[in-house]
Image (cartoon, helix red, strand yellow):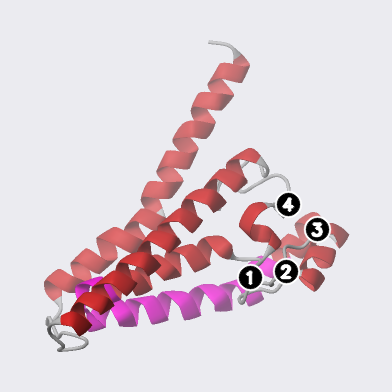
Amino acid sequence: MTQKMYQKKSSFFSHIISILLLPFNVTIIIPVLLKSFLPNRLLWGLEGPISALIFIVGLAIALTGFLLVIVTVSQFAKNGKGTLAPWDPPKKLVVSGPYRYTRNPMISGVAFVLLGESLLLCSMSVLLWFIFFTVVNYTYFIFGEEPLLTKKFGEEYLEYKKNVPRLLPRRKPWE
């Protein structure tokens, strides 16, 4: 096997492992465990057309989040030459695709999936998991990830940080 083929195969498996360990656990395993083992208190207690509307909204939010995760993971692979995993981070600063609107679209995508799931499942425990996950991750970005990115990418990251918001997306993409 050539060195290039080995690197491609290794990169593919690194992506699969990082997806299974990170977003899959957060969006599938933990919500299933919460729903299974904690008291099943329904969030809304509504029936009829209102519950159908909540289900549709939840599905739309979850699918939007799932699509955002897929797009951002592919941006990390294609443009960043790395994965979402801390053990194989992108080698280049990713400022394309959804990263032109907000600095953390991958976590936003995961948060959307969790919010959508809480609506779909009418689960208070999944809603609380969504809140906890979101607060912990955005706190980590401020105090952990942003200083590391500044150190790793220097002026390039500082310019990006100055022009692209952390949480709420820009109206127009950053060029």
Residue 150 in the image, given as x and y percentages of width and height: 78, 64
Q: Is residue 131 magenta?
A: yes
- Mark 3 nearby-residue class (10 Å; few <14, some 14–19, many ≥20): few
- Quadrant in which residue 161 is drawn: bottom right
The residue singled out by tag 3 in the image is 175
Q: Earlier in the sequence, mark 2 or mark 3?
A: 2
**Image quadrant where one finds the C terminus:** bottom right
Q: Which mark is residue 93?
A: 4
Q: Is residue 5 above or below residue 137?
A: above
Q: Earlier in the sequence, mark 4 or mark 2?
A: 4
Q: Is residue 11 above or below residue 49?
A: above
Secondary structure under the numbered disc 2 in the rendered image: helix
Residue range highlighted in magenta: 119-147
The residue singled out by tag 1 in the image is 144
The residue singled out by tag 2 in the image is 147
- Quadrant in which residue 138 is drawn: bottom right
